[in-house]
Image (spheres, rainbow, N blue to C red):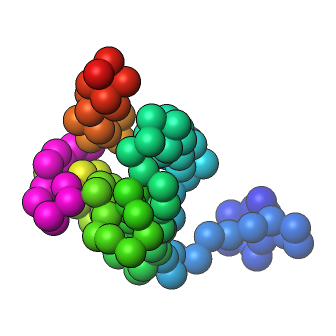
Amino acid sequence: MGQAGAPPTSGSVLPFPQRQPLQVAFTRAELLRILDLYGRMVAAGEWRDYAMDFARDMASFSAFRRAAERPQMRVEKRPALRNRQGMWTLFGEHGQALKRGHELPGVLAPMERRLLKTVAD
């Protein structure tokens, strides 16, 4: 950077103040965690299709038994709720909130238990 009071030198990058992203997205680690669960559920014969939706205030991943049905599971990331009940929410097939939390692995835990139960049967 340049000296105090001097304009920045060429090649330095300054962030835009208070600029909000145009949409919320999953990080690579989050998406890998979700797709890992999805792949294991596909292998167990539980799910066959998925959908992702990205909006200004949230990102969601939905898993379906068949493409024409409502999702069996939907996980949403809402960063605006980070300091409240947590930015992650797991919804069931009928739209009920099954789990909320600050960490993705904890929110996905009910689906992990369901997978273990399915594999054990």
Most extreme residue toward the right, as rendered? 10
Task: Estimate the x, y position of residue 74 in percent, counting from the top left.
Answer: 31, 59
On the picture, is 61 further left or further right than 113?
right
Residue 77: in sight, yes or no?
no
- Any part of residue 41 in sight: yes
Q: Is residue 100 left or right of residue 105?
A: left
Residue 111, magenta (yes or no): no
Decide: is 68 above or below 113. below
Q: State the image coordinates of residue 94 (x, y, percent, origin top left).
A: 14, 64
The structure residue drawn at horizontal position 51% and vertical position 81%, both measured from the top left corner, is 22
Residue 111 sits in which quadrant? top left
Q: Residue at x 47, y 62 (%)?
A: 50
Q: Is residue 97 magenta?
A: yes
Q: Nearer the viewer, residue 105 or 35?
A: 35
Number of marks in the rendered image:
0
Query: Among all residues in the image, which is located at the extreme top?
Result: 120
Whether 109 is drawn above or below 93: the answer is above
- Bounds of the magenta span? 92-103
Instruction: Please tell me which residue lies in front, 35 or 46.
Output: 46
Task: Give the residue drawn at x 80%, y 65%.
Answer: 12
Q: Residue at x 19, y 55 (%)?
A: 92
